[in-house]
Each structure stands twice: as C-alpha cells, then as structure tokens.
Amino acid sequence: MTSTVETLPGELINGLYREGSPIADTKAPKVPLRDRWEERKFNARLVNPANRRKMHVIVVGTGLAGSSAAATLGEAGYNVSAFFYQDSPRRAHSIAAQGGINAAKNYKNDNDSVFRLFYDTVKGGDYRARESNVYRLAEVSANIIDQAVAQGVPFAREYGGLLDNRSFGGVQVSRTFYARGQTGQQLLIGAYQALERQVAAGTVQTFRRHEMLELIVVDGRARGIVVRDMVTGQVETHLADVVVLATGGYGNVFYLSTNAMGSNVTATWRAHRKGAFFGNPCYTQIHPTCIPVSGDYQSKLTLMSESLRNDGRIWVPKKKGDDRDPRQIPEDERDYYLERRYPAFGNLVPRDIASRAAKQVCDEGYGVGPSGRGVYLDFAEAIGRMGRAAVAAKYGNLFDMYQRITGEDPYQVPMRIYPAVHYTMGGLWVDYDLQSSIPGLFVTGEANFSDHGANRLGASALMQGLSDGYFVLPNTINDYLADAPFEKVPADHPAVVDAVESVRARINHFLTNNGTRSVDSFHKELGQIMWEYCGMERTEEGLKHAIGRIRELREEFWRDVKVLGTNEELNQALERAGRVADFLELGELMCVDALHRRESCGGHFRAESQTEDGEALRHDDQFAYVAAWEWTGLGEPPVLHKEDLVYENVEMKQRSYK
Ligand SMILES: Cc1cc2nc3c(=O)[nH]c(=O)nc-3n(C[C@H](O)[C@H](O)[C@H](O)COP(=O)(O)OP(=O)(O)OC[C@H]3O[C@@H](n4cnc5c(N)ncnc54)[C@H](O)[C@@H]3O)c2cc1C
C-alpha cells in the first residue's frame, strides 16, 4: 500500500496546520563534504581574546552538552552563566548513559573510518538527517575520545592497556568506547571537572536549582532568560549577548520513559513559543531493551544497555503462551527471531528494527512474562562461551541493577525486556552553526533536532552532545558574537517585563486554581494517549483521536489542576505543573507532525504505509525533509516549513539488515 499527500501552500491542511515557505541551512559551505567543517571554521568570524571578556553567554543546562559548552566557552575567555535545575551539574540526566560513545578511531582495525560512521549514521537514521552535520559529527568523534582521555575519563582498556571497543546496533564494526556500564557518568565527571576549573578561574558562574521558564527576545534576538530560584521561589531575569540551550530531551511527554524524572521540554518549548522552529517533534526513539512495565503505579522505566546485545541472545518460545521456565524450553522450541530474520546483523540490528520486531512477536501472542509484553535476553550461551567472570567484568553492574529491580538473577535465568521511550530525535531546529531560527539562540545536545534523523544509533547521543559542546559551538558562536557586545537591555524593557509577568501569572494560576486533580494524574493520562496513538505504531484515525483528547485534557488541566504549597519554598508540584503544561502543548504538535508524515520511517510505523509483507515503507519522493514547525499561538494552526534533505554522498535506499 502507498500513501499520498496533497498540500496546498497557505491553506489549512486537515484542519490542523498550514504550509509555509521552505527553510534551508545556509551556513554549511558549498564545498565537498570532507572540506565543509574546515571551511566553515576558517570562514567563521573570530572574536579577539580581549573582546571575549566583554561578552556574556548564558548556557542553560549542564549535562554533557551544556557542561562541555560552558567549560569551553569559559576557557576561551567569555563570561558564562550556567543554569541547571538540579543541585549539581553531576546530577544531569547524562549521568544515566550506560553503554558507550562512538568514535571512528578504527582501533580494532575492522575497516572503520569517518566515512563509515557517517554512512552508518545516515542509514541508521533512515535517511532523514542532514548530510553536512552527520559528516562533521563523525569527523569530530575521534577528538572527543582524546579530550576525554586527557581529562582522565577511565574508558575500558584491553589487557595490553589499549582502549577497548564494543559494538552497538546497526553497525558491523566495533567503535563504541565505554566505561563499564557508566559511560555517561564518567564523561560527565570529566566535563564537570572542566566546568569547575572555569568556575574557579572566574569565567563561569553556576546557578544551581534555577529553572528557566521564559526566553527574552529583544529586537528579534535572544537576549536573556527568566528563571525561578527553585529554593526561594524568587523570579529572576538574566540578560546576555547570546543564549545557549542544552536542556536535553522531552521523552517524558510519554510519562513512562527511561529518562530522568525531571527531564522536560519547558526551556525549548518556551523558546518555540517565542519563534524558534521545532524540528521533527514526532521522532522519538523507542529502545528495545528495557525492563517491562510491571504495574499501574510505576513512574519510571529502566533501560538495560544495548551493549548487552553484543553477547545476549533475544528469543521467544515458538509456542504461543508457553509459560514454562525458560530454562526448560529446549533450543528447537525457541525462536531467535532477530537472528532468523536479520542474519547479517542478528541481535545487533538498529533499535527501531529490534523494537518493532519485539512488538510484533508480542502482538502475535508469543510474548513472555505476566503481561505477555516481554521477550527474553539470554546470556546462557555467553556464560558458557566466556565464563561467568568475563560476563560479569563486561556487564556486572547492569546485571546487578536488573536483579535489584526484578528480583531475578540474570546469570541464572534470561532477562525479560520490552521496548520503551528513550530518546527524542526531535528538538529545536538549528542550522549548521547550531543556531535556531531566533538569532542569538543556539541549541546543543538532545535539545536540538539533532543529527540522528528518524532513528538514533546507539552510543551516538553522547557523541553528539560532546561534539556540539567541546568542538562545534565554540567555533560557530564566535561568528555571531563578532557583532557583539550588543546594546544593553534595560531591566524595564517591555520584552523583559512581559516575560517576567507571564512567568508570574502562570505560577499564580497554578497556586490559586484550587481544582481537584493532581498534576501527575494529568501527566499520566497524557502519557497514555501519547504511547497508545503516537508511540511505535500510528494511524491517521488514532492520531486525530489523540489530538482531540489532548485538547480536552489541556482544557481540563488549566481548569481543574490542584497544586499544593506555596511559591516561596521547594515545591515539586509547582515545578511539575509548569512542565506538564508545556508537555500538553508539545504532545499536540507531536501528533500533528506524526499525522502529516504519512510514511513509516525510523521507529515510526505508519500503518497506512507498509509493504505487502508488513515492513515499514518510506516515501522519499514526498517526505525526504525536516519538518520545522512554527508556533502561531495557542489553538492556532502551526506552520510547517520544510527543509529538503539532499543526499549527494549516500544513496537513499530501503534499509536492509538482512
Ligand atoms: C538510561 C539511558 C541510557 C543512555 N545511554 C546512552 C549511551 O550509552 N550512549 C549514548 O550515546 N547515549 C545514551 N543515552 C542518551 C544520552 O544519555 C542523552 O541523550 C544525553 O546524555 C543528553 O545530554 P544533554 O546534555 O543533551 O542533556 P541532559 O543530560 O538531559 O541535561 C539537561 C540539562 O538541562 C538542564 N535543564 C533542563 N531544563 C531546564 C530548565 N528549564 N531550566 C534550567 N535547566 C534545565 C538540566 O538541569 C540538565 O543540566 C542514554 C539515555 C538514557 C535515558
């Protein structure tokens, strides 16, 4: 079956959105791919060191993307203010990253190269990423490892002392550097040390427990932010020459996800409302190896790192509803369905393929565990081959974590896993310089619409966040700041006053509304709608239904939400109310984006767009573009700007991992 779209410029489409003029990245130089980054660095204007001291940069977020950016800009001599909502940068969600970080070092001599990493990433993203950015990411990847090693990040080493590598999904080489199952934590300690060094040097000032609630735009440029001190409740204004958002992803719109509980969309959504286009909001990554949902009162899902698929084998019983102890099920009664269907990549197919395959076998009734929503990830063969000690050395902390959560010992019985929301490829649209559609607003890490297209290959988010923060932004931001310092913005400027008043009005509304429903109950209901209709499988009918329900829920939220406590204290219900309010707007845009994209790509299976044998079907003739959405007001149809994706160095093909 194929699908078609009819879009008449300017007209209301499906009653939901309008199409505006196309958008394009104008910053990537028009030279061969291999020379683009060098050329851009050379052409970008510079700011001399004495002038940098006169300029003020705001960085919001101190995860890997933000810490690395703030530290590097501080070291370059800029005055940096870094904001984050945790009590320490070391608690950013980046700390959760387990499995590793990719780099095209070819240490294993297995024919890896910058071009192969570029190629794998474009293909893995189902040909929905920008070639220029992905190539630069692959190029810079090797520098990240050198930088981290110089900082003392304890990457795993082989017996002889060389850095070790392992494989992740969607590739046939070993290029993933790792620090046991704690890669994000160790990289974050490195970035945090670099940040603290600048704090001690006086170039960076950190603002802990400060949540950005509004962006200040003056004369079309981003000039500052409004934050709430989460301990005292004080609403503050901070003004600068340029603003960088490194505020992470929005997977928590689904309520249940592997993200930290605090991960949210507020910073990027407030910027979107002020004019920053939102790119590909419907692109969400569903990770295949998570611990299955166990009950109604759960608020968080746990990832089991993809690295486990290097040695673990995924299977389900061949007989539907087979509830025998898995160890009693003989080999010939097991279906190692990934190895069977994708012999070339086997258990290391990309995440979207592995997730969809798990959903399929469970939908067909072969799932295991109490809910029937689970498949086995089995280490019996690996333990037999390598020995328990070797398996423990590689994955010990992940096994311990699984045992603590489920009460089952994965050395003895296979793990049970099921896909869960994990990462968001969508985010604020940025050009090659990482600048959004608002001049002076730069966006890095998971918060931007990213280099991953419709699906992120494992171990490439850390790579992107650190590439953005250590190497890309510090080179491109100068080009913008070459025109700074800009005229001082007075504290009573109408744009500042309006932003502060809107923040105060929202806080006041939440605290005085006195409704009957908790914030979490709305969040949970929104999450159920998103998972059901905008999750792994989407249909036109379902998405339209979801949009209607989200609108009703949003109306009810503003009418009936109850937030206890006061503003002048640490008030988590108040914090969450603001975040859920933004999720309720984002959720609708995600569904509109998913509805308009009538193709299956990445992990996004559109039931109306499948091959005769039920495989995902892309429509490159109609959808090879980035969807960049413009906000036009609450309840108003958003405007879609298309950025055409041009592939000059790889050929767009239907993906095959067979
Ligand atoms: C369980 C898990 C395991 C993962 N494992 C891997 C892996 O092995 N390899 C890999 O490549 N990727 C992995 N990822 C993905 C990767 O960890 C993230 O994509 C990446 O760390 C995001 O980094 P970031 O700096 O962009 O954002 P984050 O680390 O989420 O940091 C966001 C920052 O923004 C701040 N912030 C947010 N909103 C506001 C606001 N309104 N005001 C003020 N501050 C704000 C926060 O305080 C925080 O400092 C994993 C993800 C998960 C969930």
Image (spheres, rainbow, N blue to C red):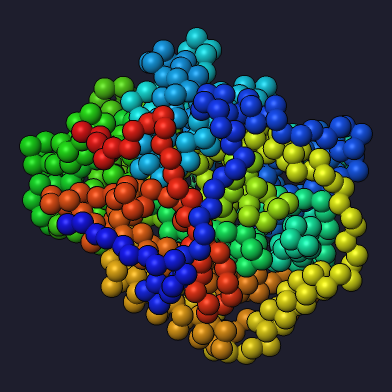
The mark total stands at: 0
Counting from the top left corner in percent of width and height, residue 524 is at 45, 72
Counting from the top left corner in percent of width and height, residue 167 is at 39, 28
The image shows residue 128, relative to residue 149, as above or below, that is below
In the figure, is residue 548 to the left or right of 487? left
Residue at screen point 66% across, 66% down: 274
Counting from the top left corner in percent of width and height, residue 541 is at 28, 73
Q: Quadrant of residue 570?
A: bottom right
- Quadrant of the image containing the C terminus: top left
Counting from the top left corner in percent of width and height, residue 283 is at 42, 54
Q: Is residue 592 visible?
A: yes
- Specify the farthest residue to the front: 9
Q: Quadrant of residue 388?
A: top left
* Closest to the observer, 395 or 524: 524
- Specify the farthest residue to the top: 160
Q: Is residue 380 visible?
A: no
* Closest to the observer, 10 or 287: 10
Q: Quadrant of residue 409?
A: top left
* Closest to the observer, 343 or 328: 343
Residue at screen point 31% across, 22% down: 386
The image shows residue 350, relative to residue 602, as above or below, that is above
Residue at screen point 31% across, 62% down: 5
- Quadrant of the image containing the N terminus: bottom left
* Closest to the observer, 23 or 236: 23
In the figure, is residue 92 to the left or right of 414? right
Residue at screen point 67% across, 56% down: 438
